Image (spheres, rainbow, N blue to C red):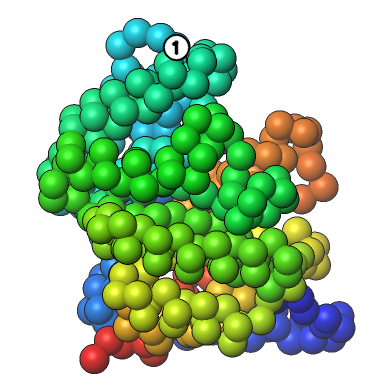
Amino acid sequence: MQLKTSRREFLALAAVGALSHTSAFAGDGNQSLGAIAAKNGFIFGAAAGPVIDTDSAYRQLYIDHTRIITTDIALKMSRVAPAAGPKRFEAADKLLQFCAQHKIPLRGHCLIWNEWVPQWIKSMSNAERERFFDSYIDEVAGRYAGKLHSWDVVNEPFWPGHKAPGGYRLGPWYETFGTDYVRRAFVRARAADPRTTFVLNEAHAERDDETGRGVRSGMLKLVDELQQAGVSLQAVGLQGHLQPRYPHDLNRFLDFVHALAAKKVDIYITEFDVRDDTFPDDIGARDALVADTARKFLAGVLAIPAVKTVIAWQLADQYSFYRDALRQKTSNPDRWARPLPFDERMQRKPLWFAMADAFREAKKA
């Protein structure tokens, strides 16, 4: 995804983006992205955070455009179990109620992850953590048994930067169980919930550098190991945070996706957006490059029959986690990130139309 483009080409891209936006809008009317995807055999949705409770216009975007929703932070361990004592399910229950009201399936994210683990759990002995791990899965997976479309049972098992054998991500669960924590989580969750689709979710596979290649090889081996152990694994999630700051080779990435598909698992793009910090300041040129990056990526992955679902990580720019990161640094950055299909006014951007075109052109047989 590394692009070397002249200023003249930037301006040309911006003009093309504006034209495609206008022409696509004329043909779409008020059609939703979810409806366009569904008509062509895909499911489109987005992660939703607590802001949908307070921003009515943003909430309406989910009602209008999504056919699936992922819990953003409501089911992360740090929110469910921030301290010893009763679990905190209020946010997740409220989002589940919202989804049920509007007949939108809900995905759980995420049951077990070596990040976002509260300090009080990290401070436990290994024996205490082992007991907590099992009881936590029993309680949380059991509470939502049969109520979710799918669960990210284990999130981001790999991070080659930690230099652990096999490229695994370090953390309290790795420290307690070694690599077997992944298998154990899936087995325990299936005992608590016999019906829900279980997903192994991972980041950075899109990168064509040492990190990305390490994640890919690790995931292929792990899926083999889980299947050989008889683990119930129906889908693999590839997050799809596209980051043009890193090298990307679409053909090599698609070879990896095909290799996953050959293992008879469905594939979800679970956290889709386009990081734009290496693109020009000009908003028209930047939005056009974001759209072009997404279009090329989606054209490739949606042509693979195993790819069923694309889920954006939020819907509108002001609620992107990239903006959250900027807000933590300064209240007045040089520019705000624009990685999502809707802008601050909840208006469709060139990325929206690029995604709609990709869904149409990759119509399932």
Q: Is residue 146 left or right of residue 25?
A: left
> Between residues 149 and 47, which one lies in front from this camera angle?
149
> Between residues 79 and 123, which one lies in front from this camera angle?
123
Q: Is residue 249 left or right of residue 31?
A: right
Quarter-of-image position of residue 361: bottom left
Disc 1, SS: loop
**Relative height, residue 336 to residue 36 (above, below):** above
Quarter-of-image position of residue 363: bottom left
Quarter-of-image position of residue 249: bottom right
**Relative height, residue 252 to residue 196 (above, below):** below
Residue at the spot of label 1: 83
* The C terminus - image quarter: bottom left
Label tally: 1
Q: Is residue 217 visible?
A: yes
Q: Position of residue 29 (x, y in %)?
A: 33, 75
Kind of residue at disc 1: Ala
Residue visible at 69% across and 61% down in the picture? 211
